[in-house]
Image: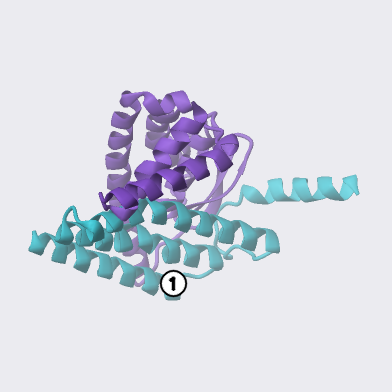
Chain colours: A purple, B cyan
Amino acid sequence: MRYLTLFIIMFLLWMLITLNLALSNIIVGLVAALITALVFGSQFKLNWKKFYNPLRYIWLLIYIIVFVWECIKANFDVAFRVLSPKMPIKPGIVKVRTKLKTSFARVILANSITMTPGTITVDVIDDDLFIHWIYVSSKDSKIYTKKIIGRFEKLLKRIFE
Amino acid sequence: MNTISIILFIVGAAFDLFGCIGLLRLPDVYNKLQSATKSVTLGTCSILLGLFIHYGFTAVGLKALIAIPILFFTSTVAAHALVRGSYLFGVKLWDKSVIDDYKKVVQISTEGKEVEK
């Protein structure tokens, strides 16, 4: 089943990238996906049952909307800091504790944090994320934990766990 | 449709420009990286989205759309690797940095390794 899931993902990706419904193209895609699935199937550690739950895809869509909105806000914020003559920045590395358990969810969380302007994930050690923040607005760990990962975490928990 | 894609192109180019200005103006490695890697999110992604809207569901448009998640994964991994690498290499934070929680952990882990040797 794990091999089949990987096969389906690879084949869909192939069809999206080539976007050609000719029979020869489909056959090449099937063969390529089959080889990939056979070679890398044993490395495919994600729980395959989660891929067949449609509810997770709905949460994923909501997550994308929330993420884009956060990104736009943060982008304007950073653009303002860069362009203003005084440069109001207060950089620092803060420690944030996450409740997510699976490694894939953590990867997506760390990537989301890095992708949001103003914050970069420096390292992940056990449950702690170390985040370089361009404007450390408060030193209370509860407040900045909520500010940085609060919204993402709830949704990611629904999607991946 | 055409106007929307042009607006997206302009927004994307503007934010890429802000990213470049930030790269020049901000003080240390970490802050420069913030601005260098992050102009991608709104800048480049909105250019790609504009391409998608311009071409619609054709081969070019869909490829532009697929490029967005690929950018999402590659540029974040690059930024993360650069930041972590430069910290462990010993590049110091800016003098006016407020807080550094990572320092303690790095010290503990390096001391631990020395003891093991």
- Identified by mark 1, the residue type is Leu
- Frontmost residue, A35 versus A147: A35
Please provide percent x and percent y for residue B84: 61, 56
Residue shown at the point (86%, 50%) measured from the top left: B114
- Outermost residue, front side: A24
Q: Residues within 10 Å of mark 1 (few under 14, many from 20)?
A: many
**A158 w.r.t. A87: above or below:** above
**Residue A118 appears in the rendering:** yes
Q: What is the total number of numbered labels drawn onto the structure image?
A: 1
Please provide percent x and percent y for residue A109: 46, 40
Residue shown at the point (59%, 38%) measured from the top left: A43
Please provide percent x and percent y for residue A78: 36, 60
Q: Secondary structure at mark 1?
A: helix
Residue A154: which quarter of the image?
top left
- Frontmost residue, A111 versus B94: A111
**Residue A161 appears in the rendering:** no
- Outermost residue, bottom side: B24
User: What residue did someone put label 1 on?
Assistant: B23
Q: What's the chain of the residue with tag 1? A: B
Please provide percent x and percent y for residue A132: 52, 53
- Frontmost residue, B43 versus A75: B43
Looking at the image, residue B109 sits to the left or right of residue A1; the answer is: right
- Frontmost residue, A13 versus B32: A13
Residue shown at the point (82%, 45%) measured from the top left: B112
